[in-house]
Image (cartoon, rainbow, N blue to C red):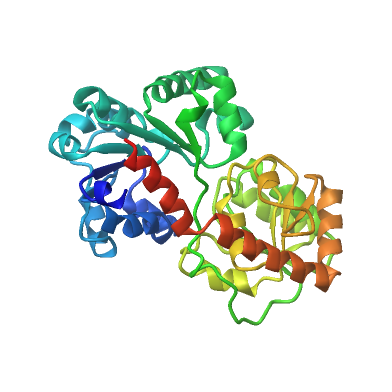
């Protein structure tokens, strides 16, 4: 298997509007490139087709020698550039043996390249675009456009990588895709970086990491902490930042809004927390939760799609409902039981090592590439 891959070149098409610089700005660069640096010794070459300018080339020293950055070569709107990318990067597209999407939003470019150059297409969805848009309440005409694009892409894919069972069930229900064409490959965690570390735990401190958006249910989390002697530390940015600050002030809850943080710095911060919480209304395969579990933290998560696939109640985490009352009860129950916290933290770390290590995920992807 590894011998055949050494003759193959992989072309990764970034999500529309995403660049290496953007990954760096939001703190995700090291996390996103890790698997490709690990994969690089087993392949002839890997291309990164990004939507960044030539400024993206400054990140070459963080990549393996056989990873080639192909930045945006014309100052076109990204939607238009996506359509002409296979023509503008004709040489690299011809050289590649396998096309892969990082997310569905960037799938049109490799689909066009597949049509021109007849190379196999692997469609990866870290989250399912239509599913997420429905849950977010997008207007009907946007949903129609997204469904049309996904239908076209899924039907032309040689293989589909989805990150969770609930996402696979949605795709099988909504689209005419053979089940054998889908493989669940979960988000990976760098288990050496995200690991339990010696630190001074901040007593009565709860951490949250993620977008400040409606589906994360942060208003209910803040309300649940009203009257409790806890500090909530929030890492992340989003449209609800100002509203959440006002809500915290209204509820008289101590909340530290710290903005984005580099993935390299996040493990030490997580290890300072007493517990981690993800109060979302829905999830896919939440990286923030997985990273907290890798650090051996006791975690609380809502009993919703996505979280349900990861948490075994009181074994590797604690499940609660999305309401203010249930979140409050979970926080009190967990923090008042040191034995339960220890059991859940140990169970969480064990599960991550068994199912979500970068080595485990890379092996799954290599098995797919070797058959194309």
Residue found 16% across the figure and 34% down from its top: 94
Task: Examine the rendering and report whether any part of residue 14 can be seen.
Answer: no
Residue 153, position in %: x, y?
Answer: 39, 24
**26 is higher (above) or lower (below) than 132:** below
Q: Does residue 259 appear left or right of residue 48 in this picture?
A: right
Q: Nearer the viewer, residue 32 or 121?
A: 121
Q: Place residue 60 in its image quadrant.
A: bottom left
User: Can residue 192 be seen in this snapshot?
Assistant: yes
Q: Which residue sits at x=43%, y=25%?
A: 154
Of 128 and 51, nearer the camera is 128
Q: Residue at horizontal 85%, vertical 69%?
A: 337
Q: Position of residue 68 (x, y in %)?
A: 21, 51
Can you give x and y, in whole percent of width and height, for residue 284 in the image?
A: 59, 41
- Residue 92 sits in quarter: top left
**Residue 358: where, in percent of width, then height?**
46, 58
Q: Is residue 132 left or right of residue 251?
A: left
Vertical side of 140 occupied by 307: above or below? below
Left or right: 333 in relation to 8: right
Residue at x 60% of width, y 82% of height: 198
Relative horizontal placement of residue 367, taking residue 120 as reference (left or right): right
Judge by depth and name the residue closer to the eye, 212 or 105: 105
Residue 332 is drawn in which quadrant? bottom right
Count of marks overlaid on the render:
0
| Residue with the most extreme left position | 91
Picture layout, residue 333 above or below residue 85: below
User: Which quarter shows the C terminus?
Assistant: top left
């Amino acid at each position: 298997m590894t011998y055949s891959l050494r003759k193959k070149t992989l072309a990764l098409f970034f999500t529309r509007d995403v660049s290496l610089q953007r990954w760096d700005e939001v703190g995700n660069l090291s996390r996103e490139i890790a698997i490709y640096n690990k994969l690089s010794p087993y392949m002839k070459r890997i291309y990164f087709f990004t939507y960044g300018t030539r400024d993206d080339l400054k990140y070459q020293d963080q990549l393996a020698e056989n990873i080639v950055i192909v930045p945006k070569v014309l100052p076109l709107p990204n939607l238009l550039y996506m359509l002409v990318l296979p023509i503008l990067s004709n040489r690299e597209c011809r050289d590649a043996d396998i096309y892969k999407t990082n997310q569905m939003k960037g799938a049109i470019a490799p689909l066009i390249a597949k049509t021109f150059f007849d190379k196999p297409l692997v469609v990866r969805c870290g989250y399912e675009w239509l599913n997420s848009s429905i849950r977010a309440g997008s207007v009907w005409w946007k949903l129609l456009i997204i469904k049309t694009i996904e239908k076209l892409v899924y039907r032309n894919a040689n293989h589909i990588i989805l990150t969770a069972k609930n996402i696979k069930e949605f795709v099988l229900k909504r689209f005419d895709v053979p089940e054998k064409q889908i493989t669940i490959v979960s988000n990976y965690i760098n288990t050496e970086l995200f690991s339990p570390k010696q630190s001074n735990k901040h007593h009565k401190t709860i951490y949250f990491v993620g977008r400040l958006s409606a589906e994360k249910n942060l208003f209910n989390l803040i309300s649940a902490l009203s009257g409790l002697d806890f500090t909530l530390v929030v890492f992340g940015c989003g449209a609800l930042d100002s509203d959440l600050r006002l809500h915290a002030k209204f509820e008289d809850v101590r909340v530290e809004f710290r903005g984005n943080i580099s993935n390299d710095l996040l493990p030490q911060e997580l290890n300072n927390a007493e517990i981690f919480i993800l109060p979302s209304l829905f999830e896919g395969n939440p990286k923030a939760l997985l990273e907290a579990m890798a650090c051996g933290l006791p975690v609380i998560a809502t009993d919703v799609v996505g979280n349900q696939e990861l948490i075994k109640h009181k074994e590797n985490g604690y499940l609660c409902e999305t309401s203010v009352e249930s979140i409050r009860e979970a926080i009190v129950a967990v923090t008042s039981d040191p034995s339960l916290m220890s059991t859940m933290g140990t169970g969480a770390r064990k599960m991550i090592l068994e199912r979500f290590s970068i080595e485990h995920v890379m092996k799954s992807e290599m098995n797919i590439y070797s058959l194309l």
